[in-house]
Image: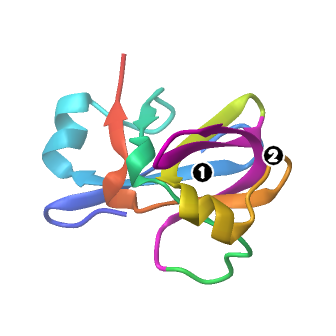
Amino acid sequence: MGGRVNSEVIISLPGDVEIVSVVTNSAIKSLELEADKTAYALIKALNVIIGIDVQKISARNVLTGKISSILEGSVNDEVSISLGSDFTITAVITKSSVASLGLEVGTIASAIIKASDVILAVD
């Protein structure tokens, strides 16, 4: 879907997983993006929010999977969610959030990312 300034770009991954990015039309032109061209979605772990039982939310990207690892830090923890098909997304959230959500390896959780936080890259 395109507008005068920005457009949505949808990257399809195996397993019916899609990642939506909102980028400027000039970026689409400079990256030479077009249908069926390989592109990469870059997402900073600090821009990923973790949710449990997410039903309705305004963020375009809600990627649900199983927590595959939690690396504990002194203030923040790194939480990785396996999306299947060898895809993993990682979030850095506070230790108190990990505790209040009851996150453990094996827990079903969703990685939530605003489309404007997804950066696109090409070879």
Q: Can you name the residue that lies furthest to the bottom here?
A: 56
- Image label count: 2
The region drawn magenta spans 58-84
Q: Residue at x 44, y 30 (%)?
A: 39
Vertical arrangement, residue 23 with respect to residue 109, above or below: above
Percent x, y for residue 52? 70, 70
121 and 42: which is toward the camera = 42
Estimate how packed mark 1 is, as few (under 14), some (14 to 19) or many (20 or more) residues with alpha carbons within 10 Å.
some
**Quadrant of the image for the N terminus?**
bottom left
88 and 68: which is toward the camera = 68
Q: Which residue is mark 1?
A: 18
Q: Residue at x 38, y 37 (%)?
A: 34
Mark 1 belongs to which amino acid?
Answer: Glu
Rendered image quadrant of residue 8 = bottom left
Q: Residue at x 65, y 71 (%)?
A: 100
Q: Secondary structure at mark 2?
A: loop
Q: Which residue is mark 2?
A: 105
Q: Secondary structure at mark 1?
A: strand
Estimate how packed mark 2 is, as few (under 14), some (14 to 19) or many (20 or more) residues with alpha carbons within 10 Å.
few
- Name the side, left or right, on which 1 lies relative to 69: left
Q: Residue at x 41, y 62 (%)?
A: 114
Rendered image quadrant of residue 115 = bottom left
Q: Can you name the residue that lies furthest to the right here?
A: 106
88 and 10: which is toward the camera = 88
